[in-house]
Amino acid sequence: MESVGVYGFCGCKAKNKMKCDSRWEITAAETAPTSAYSSPARSLGDTGITPLSPSHIVNDADPNVSEQQTFLVVVAIDFGTTSSGYAYSFTKEPECIHVMRRWEGGDPGVSNQKTPTTILLTPERKFHSFGYAARDFYHDLDPTEAKQWLYLEKFKMKLHTTGDLTMDTDLTAANGKKVKALEIFAYALQYFKEQALKELSDQAGSEFENSDVRWVITVPAIWKQPAKQFMRQAAYQAGLASPENSEQLIIALEPEAASIYCRKLRLHQMIELSGKVAVNGYSASDTVGAGFAQAKEHVRRNRQSRTFLVENVIGEIWSELEEGDKYVVVDSGGGTVDLTVHQIRLPEGHLKELYKATGGPYGSLGVDYEFEKLLCKIFGEDFIEQFKIKRPAAWVDLMIAFESRKRAAAPDRTNPLNITLPFSFIDYYKKFRGHSVEHALRKSNVDFVKWSSQGMLRMSPDAMNALFKPTIDSIIEHLRDLFQKPEVCTVKFLFLVGGFAEAPLLQQAVHAAFGDKCRIIIPQDVGLTILKGAVLFGLDPAVIKVRRSPLTYGVGGKHPPEKLLVKDGTRWCTDVFDKFISADQSVALGELVKRSYTPAKPSQLVIVINIYSSEHDTVSFITDPGVKKCGTLRLDLTGTSGTAVPARREIQTLMQFGDTEIKATAIDIATSKSVKVGIDFLNY
C-alpha cells in the first residue's frame, strides 16, 4: 500500500514552524468560498486565501426517500437493555403497525409484548436461545451443568459504558467466561431477523425475502458514534444488511422515535399527570395511581390485538401546539435516560431538535444495583460475588423475583413487599458462613428488611422506595439542569416514555418537580412507544428535519518540520483544527459539509485522515484541551485512476451530519468517478 500522505484544503497560514509527527499534510486551496458560511481560516486571522472548504450545501432531497419505495415492509427492532421486541408495517399500509407475536414464557404482572434481552450460548459457544426461552432453559439446567453454559443479560449497557469500544470488546457471561460483544449482538439481531421473517412469511403465505425489508434498530440518542457503528456492524454480521446495501438499515434514536409516535396520539391514548383538567375522568392527583393502573388494564385487555392503527393526522395534543412550540421527550429505559428537546414545524408537523441530546446511565438498572448493594450489606460482598459465580441460575431467579416486586412499588403503598429467596441461596449461605440467612438479617442492623419463615425477604415500602431514590434523583437533577437552558425553559409538554416510565415513583417525582412548568404526558402503551415510533421513522426517515450535533468534529494533523509546506513563499499551519461542525450546532437533514483533499503523491492509492472531536464548540487546534482523536476518514483511490489523471488530483468529500449517523461520499473531480469513502470510529 502506498503511504498515507495527503494534502487537504484547510487554509490556515502559520507564521512559525510547528513541531509535528503525523504522516500527512494539509495545505490551502486557492479557491473562493462556495457559500455564506464562514471558514475557520477567517476566524483565525487569515485575510488572504479562503479555502474551498468548509462549505455547506443544503440538499433538499433526502437521500433515503427514493430508496424507501423498494422495500415492502419496515421492521423495527427495539433492542433494549432489559427487554427487546420488534414491530412492522407494510409500506402500502403505513397506518397499521403490527407488534410481534406473543412471546412464550413471561412473568406474573409483567407485559410479555417484549422479551427479556437475555441470550444463552451452549458450552461450545454456539447460539442456543434468546429472551424468555433462554432464561427458562438456563433456569432449568442442573447447577453443575449451568456453569458450562454462557448466559448474558442486560449487556447493551456495555456499548455506552466502554470508553474505548472496539470490534474486539468483550462481554462477561454469568459464569465469568468472556465472549466477544460483536458476536453476542449479532446473534441477538439474527434471532430477531429470523423471527420477523418467519412471521412475515406466515402472514403473506409465501417466503418473505430479507431484501424486501427495511430494518430499523433503535439506540439511545446519547450514544456516541462508535456505539452506533458497532450496532451497524453487528447488523451486517447478522445479515440484516450489508456495507454495499447500507441504506437497508437505519439507526433510529430512541427519544426521536418516541417523539414521532407521540405526535399521533389521541386523548384516550395518553395519561396526563399535570394540569387541572381531568383526562379520562381522572385528575392529575388520581392519575399517578388509579388512572395509570386503569390505563395499563385497558392495554392488557387489548393485547390480543397486535395491530395498532396510527391515523395519518396530528393527534389532539399536537393540535394544541403552535408553530415554534417546544416539548421535551424523556425516554427512561432500563439502562439509560435520554432527553431530547423538539420544536414543532407546521403545517407538515416536521420536527426540529432544539438542544443536543443529553442524559446518562439513570435507567431502571440503577434500582437493581441498589438492591444488590443492599444484599451485600446484609450478607457480605464476598458471599454475593461467590454466589453469582457458583449458583448463576439461582442469582437469575432472585433478580426475577425482585423485578416482579419492583414493579409493585408505589408512593402510597403501605404493606410490605415479599421477595422469595431461592433455596440454593439459603443453603449456600449456610455452607459459606456457617450460620443462617435469618441470623445474617438480625446481625445486619438493616431494620427495614425482615425475614419471613416462608423463605422470603420482607421489605417495607420505604425500603423499596429507598432503592429507587438515587436513580430517580439523578433523573430529576438532570432534568432541572436541562430546564435551565434558554432553549428549554419555555417547553409546553414533557412526554415521559420508556419502560421505566411505568414506575409510579418516577411519575410522581417528575410530576412534583415539573408539573407547574409544563404538561406531563404518558402514553398508555408506554413500553411500546419507541418500538412503534421506530416503525414510523423507517417509513419516513425525513420527519426529523433539523438535529443538533452532540460534539465538535474536525480534522487536523501535526508533522515534522521538514514536512512543513511552503507555497508561494507562505508557510501553512499544520496542526490547525479544521472544523467540520460545532457542538450543539443545528444541522438540517441533507445539509452537507464539503472538503477537498489531494494525495501527497500521484501514485498514492489511499488517503487516511484523522478525525478529532471535542465537547467544546470553540476549538482552534488539535492540541487544545479536550480535543481527542475519535476516528478516521479513509479515501480509497483504487479504480479511479485513468490515463489523464493530473499530477495534483482533487478528491471532493461530502459529509452529512444531520442524520442519526455521520455519513460521507467522495468523488475524484478529474475523472468524475466515485471514490470509496469510509468513516471509522471503531478501528483507528
Image: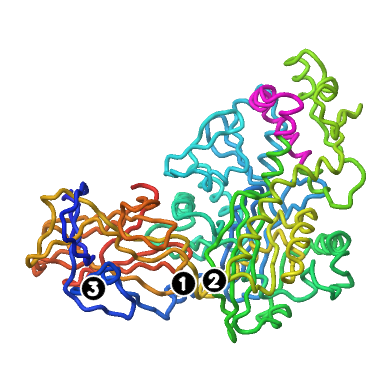
Q: What span is colored magenta in the figure?
A: 373-402
Within the magenta stretch, is there residue 378? Answer: yes
Residue identified by numbered label 1: 586
Q: Secondary structure at mark 2?
A: strand
* Magenta segment main secondary structure: helix
Viewer-nearest residue: 96 or 152: 152
Instruction: Give the residue furthest to the bottom.
Output: 347
Give the CA distance from mark 1 to mark 2.
Answer: 8 Å
Viewer-nearest residue: 619 or 101: 619
Residue identified by numbered label 3: 52
Q: Earlier in the sequence, mark 2 or mark 3?
A: 3
Q: Amino acid at mark 3?
A: Leu
Q: Secondary structure at mark 1?
A: strand
Q: Are marks 3 and 1 in contact (CB under 8 Å)?
A: no
Residue identified by numbered label 2: 353
Give the CA distance from mark 3 to mark 1.
Answer: 22 Å
Q: Earlier in the sequence, mark 1 or mark 2?
A: 2
